[in-house]
Image (spheres, rainbow, N blue to C red):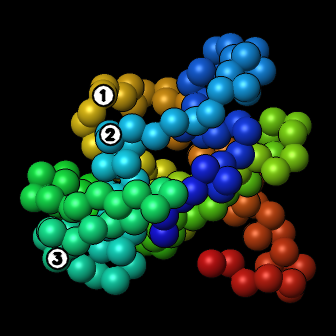
Amino acid sequence: MTTTPEAHARLSPSGAKKWFACPGSLTMEAPFPNKSSTHSDDGTAMHDVAARCLTQHERASKYIGEWIPVDKGRKVQFDEEMADLTQGYVDYVRTKAIGHTLLVEQRLSFSKFVGMPDQFGTADSVIVNWPQGCVEVDDLKTGHRGVECEDNPQLMTYGVAVIGELYEKAMAQEAGDDPLY
């Protein structure tokens, strides 16, 4: 479940706040490599464990002490603090998903909405509440910096992408070509 730099689109949803506000930042930053940090490596490890917990019905504490591969041969030792942060997210998602469709680490394309091919992101979790016609996109945040939840460009990008994909799947299902999740 580890994400590598090659697996990122140019218009990364996690960078949407910046490229929404300043599209030129993409060109200006292009020559510079995307460097990892201790915080981003820790976040990658927590995302990996969260996905395992949600798909394999485990608790984050199971992974305390395990070395989690994060990128380019680096590993992070999963600790108790990480387990607590991760479990809070896992518990929230599990509770919200009861009786609904839960998609974990869902790759979502949003190319058609930005007019640029091969643009996608991977949503940590998507909860589809079919009876109410609602979609909830959740992203594990680990507390190393503040994140504004209201009108969050990253989550809005995922939201547009998932609604677009659900629409396409519904049209394919109506035509008898594809089952809906």
Judge the density around disc 1: few (<14), some (14-19), many (≥20) Cα neighbours within 10 Å: few
Name the residue: 57% across, 56% down: 4
- For mark 1, give the secondary structure: loop
> What is the three-letter code of the residue carrying label 2?
His
Q: CA distance from mark 1 to mark 2?
A: 10 Å
The residue indicated by pointer 3 is 62
What kind of residue is marked 3? Lys
Q: Is residue 94 visible?
A: no
Q: Residue at x 86, y 85 (%)?
A: 176
- Residue topped by disc 2: 39
- Amino acid tagged 1: Arg
**Residue 151 is at least partly visible in this image:** yes
Image quarter of the C terminus: bottom right
144 displayed left or right of 48: left
In the rendered picture of this protein, how many numbered marks are placed on residues?
A: 3
Q: Is residue 27 left or right of residue 162?
A: right
